[in-house]
Image (cartoon, rainbow, N blue to C red):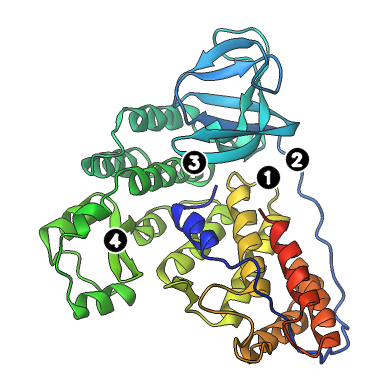
Amino acid sequence: MRTPHLLLLVCLLTVTIISCKQNTKQPDTTPVVTPAMPEKPEVVLYVATVDKLNLRDQPNRNGKVLTQVAEGTLLEGTGKSSDAKEEVILRGISYNEPYLEISAVAGTPQAGWAYGAALQAVYAGKRAGGPDQDKIAQLAALLNTLDTKNMESGKKAWDFVATAFSNEKNATADAAFILLQQFLFRMEREGEFYVQTEKIKWTDDDFQAVSTGKFDLNKYPLTRKLAENGFSLSQGEGMIFPVVDWRRLHDFFGPKASPGMKSYIDQEMIEETEQVWDDGGIIVSLEDLADRAVFWEKFSNEHPYFPLADQARESARWMRLVLVNGADNTPTFNYEDQSIAPDFRKVWTYITQKYPGTELAKVCEEISGLCAAEGWKRTKKVEDWQTAFANRYE
């Protein structure tokens, strides 16, 4: 699951508008090198994210309950997942996920199946290189006691992490980052602290400072309190609201994380501080968005067993969709004459020339051929293709 921002961004997409790229195609002389598939992990570790999580003898809700697992429990997966998925609502969010097989845990002598969305992966790799499970269990137990609707919980979580994980590196630091990040995002979503920031009479200078990342969080008592508890500010749709302080996460965990996790954190830092959206429109260059999309596509291919692989794949997925379909206030066509927007035609050329062989480039080539045949207009054929493409991602 990506951050709450991602859920908002995906909702801003207009799935029936269309786009394309220039018809000029340069010869592709760059060989496409398929990276070797990384070795399958010996062990995958999860933390239960809901209380009284059912462990069943079959991978569906009708399976017999073998035992129930408390929130925060550290579990070991077998690497198996069910073919079928089920729709479940957890903490007000709808999921459609498979069941994952879990090794024997206290209370049952056999393996069982737990719903995937109720498990947070914190490690996947060789058993010998795994995290310090005692420390991770302690952090998970602490977070389970904290109220996500109480702003002071952020400081309590950060204080524990700063002390317990100050000298930890690689897998242990990675796992701590995942748990703290997910907890803070829960606070952002469930705490509804934006209700408090709505009461501040923000100035035009405040909006400008927030948008450029230069706002002094010590300016107001509330913003100072937000900073103390692990939050920063963002702005959009004419509002200023609290968000997780990614710079603090980056500065603490970046030097400690494994190479793969550091790459993930570095990219997330860029994207959280240089937002793509405002008022339903794309506010970075389309070439920048393309670079981000390809980063996540390649990252997902190179790290298929990464604990946050689902988030990486989702980033690549929605950025690809935006680059092909456009957004509400950044359409791929001119409303007056239905012609394809020059910026989009330009970015498709950029993508196919700079990133040949990627999934993104393949999609651009496909829609480009159709658009060229339709005279670079938003015809019924193009619109139908775009609608079908968007439906693949629902």
The disc at residue 305 is 1
Frontmost residue, 276 versus 386? 386
User: x, y percentage for residue 32?
Assistant: 85, 71
Q: Is residue 324 left or right of residue 261?
A: right
Marks 1 and 2 sit apart, C-alpha to C-alpha, by 7 Å
Asked whether 297 or 385 is in front, the reply is: 385
**Which residue is labeled 4 in the image?**
241
Q: Secondary structure at mark 4?
A: strand
Q: Earlier in the sequence, mark 1 or mark 2?
A: 2
Q: Earlier in the sequence, mark 1 or mark 4?
A: 4
> In the rendered image, which quarter is residue 167 located in?
top left
Using the image, determine if residue 76 lies above or below residue 169.
above
Residue lying at 81% horizontally and 77% vertically, measured from the top left = 365
The reply to whether discs 3 and 2 touch (Cβ–Cβ < 8 Å) is no
Depth check, mark 3 against mark 2: the one in front is 3
Q: Judging from the image, what secondary structure is the residue with disc 2 in?
A: loop
Measured Cα–Cα span from mark 3 to mark 1: 24 Å
The residues bearing labels 4 and 2 have C-alpha atoms spaced at a distance of: 41 Å
State which mark lies toward you, 1 or 4: 4
> What amino acid is at disc 2?
Lys
Residue indicated by mark 3: 93
Tag nearer the camera, 3 or 1: 3
**Pointers 1 and 2 in contact (C-beta within 8 Å):** yes
- Give the structural element (helix, strand or loop) at label 1: loop
Task: Say which residue appears at 74% left-offset and 87% top-offset.
Answer: 377
